[in-house]
Image (spheres, rainbow, N blue to C red):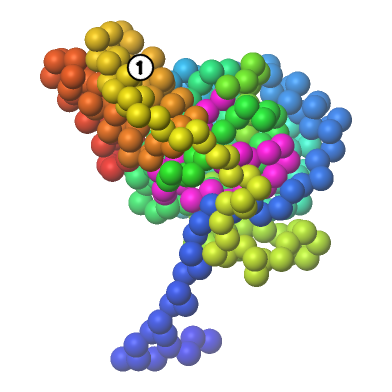
Amino acid sequence: MSVMTHGTAPAPAPAAAPKRTTKITSLDLDAERLAEDLRRAEGFAYNDSYSEFICGAWRSCMLWNRSGDLADTRLEDFSGPGRITPYGAQLPYLFEVIGDVFQTESLKFARLARLTPGSVLVPHRDYLELEDDLIRIHLPIQTSRDCYSSEDDTIYQMRHGELWFLDATRPHSAASFTDRDRVHLILDFAVDDVSEVFTEGFEQTCLDLHGLSGGEVPPDNIVTRAELLPGERESYVALAGVLSTENYEDVLAMVIKKFFKSELAVTDVFGWFGRIAEASGQPELVARVRRHEEHCLVRR
Ligand code: YCP
Ligand code: CO
């Protein structure tokens, strides 16, 4: 029976726990069963949706989505639970892990994402095109010490088997400097707080949820970068001399790679790239950079 009476102000909602990117725990993955799923997933057809956020290739396939149809490759608003796709059903081990760890009633999307060697993501914010933000979980299932992630101005590493909550509403990026695909399982849940995504069994055995809200990237996962040297920015701005429509993505990739290796702020990525475009004297490229920046970080 409802205790709400007409004219009574609703009780104030409890203050939402801060959402900060956090390592939740390390999963003890079964190497053989995971390898079997990864082998099967090598044969999947991946799509290039979201190529505007990529220099190189970040290819994904849906394991769970609105329709259960592999052709629905983008995040979208919908009500009710997500449905497993034929690819999701072909990965018995990952299916089991997902079911053991998460309350799948609120799971909207599950994807496998392959970041190919040498590729980088353009700093971007997710969910801008959706009505509501989702709760994003990452599980790296094939990665290396030469793969990096970023949030705001922090560079960090998500290591194999670590379960992460990502605040995908903040500017974030990734880079692969290795020679094989980085593969992550990426999950999106329609809940308000990350503490709501886990099964009770998992919470009891694996989690101290008190440490979770208000968490942050553990110092051990943070990567330190080289100090920016005098003259380096100018050397990059000199790429204005070669910038063209055809190598737009290549020059942007160079700036993003510099961000992962030297102490730039994330705002410097489009800052430096915009400066390169301006110095090139090509107004159409300046406008393209501004549109691109807005699409990635402000609105779409
Ligand atoms: C997403 N972030 O999660 C986006 C697009 C790169 C990563 C592609 O949908
Ligand atoms: Co993203």
Residue 161 on the magenta segment: yes
Residue 67 on the magenta segment: no
- Label 1 amino acid? Val
Residue 230 sits in quarter: top left
Residue 144 sits in quarter: top right
Q: Residue at x 58, y 18 (%)?
A: 117
- Give, as a single range, the part of the protein colored magenta: 156-176
Q: Looking at the rendering, in which quadrant would you find the C terminus?
A: top left
Residue 51 place in picture, x, y as percent: 41, 23
Farthest residue, direction front: 230
Within 10 Å of disc 1 (Cα), the crowding (few <14, some 14-19, many 20+) is many
Q: Is mark 1 within 8 Å of ligand 1?
A: no
Residue 82 sits in quarter: top right
Disc 1 marks which residue?
251
Q: Nearer the viewer, residue 206 or 282?
A: 282
**Helix, strand or loop at mark 1:** helix
Residue 147 place in picture, x, y as percent: 60, 29
State whether residue 9 is above or below residue 191: below
Residue 40 place in picture, x, y as percent: 74, 22
From this viewpoint, is residue 52 visible? no
Q: Residue at x 24, y 27 (%)?
A: 274
Q: Nearer the viewer, residue 194 or 72?
A: 194
From this viewpoint, is residue 290 visible? yes
- The total number of labels drawn is 1
